[in-house]
Amino acid sequence: MSILIKNGRIITAADDYVADIFIQEEKITTIGKNLDVKADQVIDAKNKLVFPGGIDPHVHLDMPFMGTYSSDNYETGTRAALFGGTTMVIDFILQTQGKSLHDALKEWKGRSDGNAVGDYSFHMAVTDFNDTTKAEIKDMIEKEGITSFKTFMAYKGALMIDDRQMVGLMNEVKKRGGMVTTHATNGDMIDFLVAKNKSEGKFSPLYHYLSQPEITESEASGRFADMAYHTGVPAYIVHMTCEGALNHIRDAAKRNQKVFVETCIQYLVLDASLYDKGFESAKWVMSPPLREKKDQESLWAGIDQGSVQVVATDHCPFMWEQKKMGEKDFSKIPNGHPAIENRMELLFSHGVNKGRISLNKFVELTSTNAAKIFGMHPRKGCIAVGTDADLVIFDPNEKHMLSAKTHHMNCDYSGYEGWELTGKCKTILLRGKVAVDNNQLLVKKGYGQFIRRNKFS
């Protein structure tokens, strides 16, 4: 089915112009003013913005964690993403210690295949690097199209690897043309502080925050950057939250090292004052935790300076009953936050509308940079002839309110309940098909495709 989008103000990472877009067979085929073509469907985008479909490179769907599973699966999670303008996500496969990467891939494919509504790909989280795992890296990159490998510097006994394993993984991934990403917090220090607080009878969600002070993240970020510098591997730090960590990356730039940095929307708009609400604060228990106002300002400055390239979500929702697993012990609260649907509208309202970022920077942060970093550009993340027709038609003036009553995430609360935003995703196209229009889903489970990614270049 061919589609003609007329009169839209097209915004890319580099451009800003008014034109028509003609779409055939999943691809953009023509862009120009006043196109004289016949189309099966015409969409008038006058007074609307047209963005590339959002890419969220940090989500956890149907993820086993702390004795339960995140409450959004591949169907509900990618559906909610589409309503919020995100047409593509990258989820994390978690290797089980003692088992192979191929075992983990098979397990995650069992959850994703035939279930996703939007497009998706995988990062491979390596939790047990040994000779067997090392031999699998080549296959993951060359046969499976999975080119990024996640490490955890925390969660000892389940996910964390030590520095020796980290360096070994970095050397192999560098050799094969991939990238290493990390959860950069000092797991040993955090475990010590958790045990100390609990021994002193401190069990409220506030102590989740106080057990992960800024130094635990800044130290690990610097150590990761140093190991990446030593090995020469392309490096990416996920969900950065604080000034201290970002300063280590600024220092790395002085030696001509490039470390890619992702922050998440919650760290730009929420702060640690939310941990003073009794057990209700469990809604915002995530790792790393929310930080201080000064950290928000540092992250916004890092975006402006080009030190922070991506705004993701770390979407990992849990129902309130699941959060209550930690009602008497903060260390048993499942870590995570629902945000996959809210990311783009929050960033537009609090970034573009408040003069913190330009429209072009908005597209960089929500789509183009992730596509480039993770080997999907130009197929994804831009508006050009020959690219996938993943598009967001956006009303920059529509006011609306965020609420658990109206969101599509499978979560019975919102971290942004009652927030009024200006700017709304109206019509979403995924690979040339109208996926969402007038708040109605028009594609079915299974429409989402797995997207193979290219080597790092």
Image (cartoon, rainbow, N blue to C red):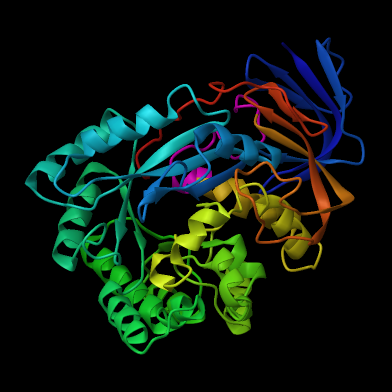
Residue stretch rendered in magenta on the structure:
371-389
Depicted 245 relative to depicted 6: above or below: below
**In the image, is residue 375 part of the stretch drawn in magenta?**
yes
Which quadrant would the C terminus be assigned to in this image?
top left
Residue 209 falls left or right of residue 95: right
Front-most of 343 and 339?
339
Q: Nearer the viewer, residue 303 or 156?
A: 156
Give the quarter of the figure containing the N terminus. top right
- Along the line of sight, which residue is nearer the eye, 399 or 409? 409
Please state if 82 lies on the left or on the right of 316 as rendered. Answer: right
**In percent of the image, x 55 and y 47: which residue is there?**
56
Q: Say which quarter of the image contains residue 334.
A: bottom left
Left or right, residue 104 beside residue 362: left
Across and down, in percent, residue 78 comes to 57, 36
Query: In this rendering, does residue 314 appear at all?
Result: no
Residue occupying the far bottom of the picture? 200
- 277 is within the stretch colored magenta: no
Return the residue found at the far left.
131
Residue 43: name its quadrant: top right
| Residue positioned most to the front | 328
Count all numbered tags in the image, as a single digit.
0
Is 405 on the left-hand or right-hand side of 370?
right
- Magenta span: predominant SS is loop
The structure residue drawn at horizontal position 56% and vertical position 61%, both measured from the top left corner, is 264
